[in-house]
């Protein structure tokens, strides 16, 4: 009976079903059941591994080694799965007490909205030009030099796809960074103000590293059901560097006034771990003409 129960056919089906159930209930915010599902999947996988180790006619040392590493891999996956579930839990906040400073009377910490803003950074390696769908617009952050950056809103009123910039680009194309601001909470936020930091240059480059703080354009409304607000980053300076998200943003909360909202930084992708400014390879023919 146990040999059939922990056979590869049955174990694979049970593990796949348990993981699917875990992900489904996680999406419904049932964190306990998600953890139980992942534990069931791990336990069944361990059973299948141990049963395999006692079934096949291999030298004892080789079977023990394979079982040890396979079971260890399952254990690592289980720990990471449980950590992932914990990372999805909403965070609670501490309310600033009375007399905590002059800022406390102007900007409070919202226990409901805290941790519900997520800011991420990614890179669009396809680079310039940027495509705009009909009747839409995009916001572009242009890093000009060590002391100056500017925002540009480009609108496409046409019925066909439009591109920015319109000048012919060199090859390979310059990369484009993407800053996304999303509301993962349960309350809408208004007039969201955030400041990002660009560290331009390198330690051994002429001028070293310069920090440039830039106020993102004000986000007038950001509801939990809205798509993330997106800003494209173009490095006109060609200095390169890193992009840093803020720890907090300021926003208007219905019934709570102006409050400081904690930013939940996502740590899931390579670009989140290494938030590089987009590489500036080529320049448009128009820019090249201006330089000569």
Image (tube, helix red, strand yellow):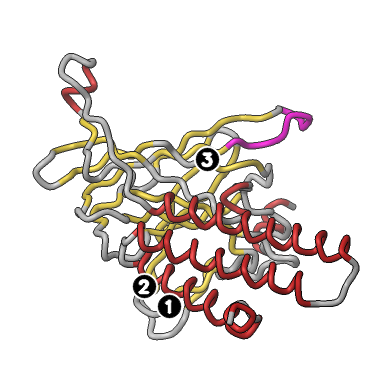
Label 1 to label 3: alpha-carbon separation = 29 Å
Q: Which mark is residue 244?
A: 3
In this view, 218 is above or below 161? above
Q: Main secondary structure of the magenta part?
A: loop
Coordinates of residue 57 in the picture (x, y in percent) = 86, 76
Coordinates of residue 129 in the picture (x, y in percent) = 58, 68
Q: Residue at x 39, y 50 (%)?
A: 118
Residue 181 shows in the view: yes
Query: Crowdedness of circle 3 by 10 Å Cα count: few (<14), some, many (20+)?
Result: some
Q: Residue at x 27, y 53 (%)?
A: 185
Q: Residue at x 40, y 54 (%)?
A: 88
Give the extent of the magenta segment.
Answer: 199-207
Q: Earlier in the sequence, mark 2 or mark 3?
A: 2
Residue 206 part of the magenta segment: yes
Q: Nearer the viewer, residue 191 or 143?
A: 191
Residues marked 1 and 2 touching at CB (< 8 Å): yes
Label 2 to label 3: alpha-carbon separation = 28 Å
Q: Nearer the viewer, residue 5 or 90?
A: 5
Q: Secondary structure at mark 3?
A: strand
Label 1 to label 2: alpha-carbon separation = 6 Å
In this view, 106 is above or below 263? above
Q: Please tell me whether mark 2 or mark 3 is closer to you in this view.
A: 3
Query: Crowdedness of circle 1 by 10 Å Cα count: few (<14), some, many (20+)?
Result: some
Residue 289 shows in the view: no
Q: Earlier in the sequence, mark 1 or mark 3?
A: 1
Coordinates of residue 175 in the picture (x, y in percent) = 64, 59
Quarter of the image for residue 134 reads: bottom left
Residue for badge 2: 136
Residue for badge 1: 133
Check the image and name the residue furthest to the right.
59
Q: Please tell me whether mark 1 or mark 3 is closer to you in this view.
A: 3
Quarter of the image for residue 51 reads: bottom right
């Amino acid at each position: 009976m146990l040999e059939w129960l922990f056979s590869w056919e049955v174990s694979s089906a049970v593990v796949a079903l348990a993981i699917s159930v875990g992900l489904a209930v996680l999406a419904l915010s049932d964190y306990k059941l998600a953890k139980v599902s992942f534990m069931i999947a791990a336990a069944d996988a361990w059973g299948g591994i141990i049963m395999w180790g006692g079934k096949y006619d291999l030298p004892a040392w080789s079977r023990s080694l394979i079982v040890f590493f396979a079971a260890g891999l399952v254990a690592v996956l289980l720990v990471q799965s449980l950590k992932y579930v914990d990372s999805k839990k909403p965070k609670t906040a501490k309310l600033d007490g009375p007399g905590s400073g002059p800022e406390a009377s102007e900007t409070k910490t919202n226990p409901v909205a805290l941790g519900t803003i997520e800011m991420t950074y990614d890179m669009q390696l396809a680079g310039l030009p940027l495509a705009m769908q009909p009747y839409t617009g995009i916001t572009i952050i242009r890093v000009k030099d060590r002391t100056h950056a500017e925002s540009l809103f480009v609108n496409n009123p046409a019925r066909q796809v439009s591109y920015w910039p319109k000048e012919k680009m060199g090859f390979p194309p310059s990369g484009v960074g993407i800053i996304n601001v999303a509301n993962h909470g349960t309350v809408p936020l208004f007039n969201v103000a955030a400041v990002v930091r660009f560290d331009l240059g390198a330690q051994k480059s002429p001028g070293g590293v310069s920090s440039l703080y830039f106020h993102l354009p004000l986000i007038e409304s950001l509801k939990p059901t809205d798509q993330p607000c997106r800003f494209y980053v173009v490095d006109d300076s060609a200095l390169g560097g890193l992009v840093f998200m803020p720890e907090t943003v300021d926003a208007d909360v219905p019934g709570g006034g102006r409050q400081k909202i904690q930013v939940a930084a996502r740590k899931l992708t390579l670009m989140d771990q290494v938030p590089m400014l987009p590489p500036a390879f080529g320049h448009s023919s128009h820019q090249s003409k201006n330089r000569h």
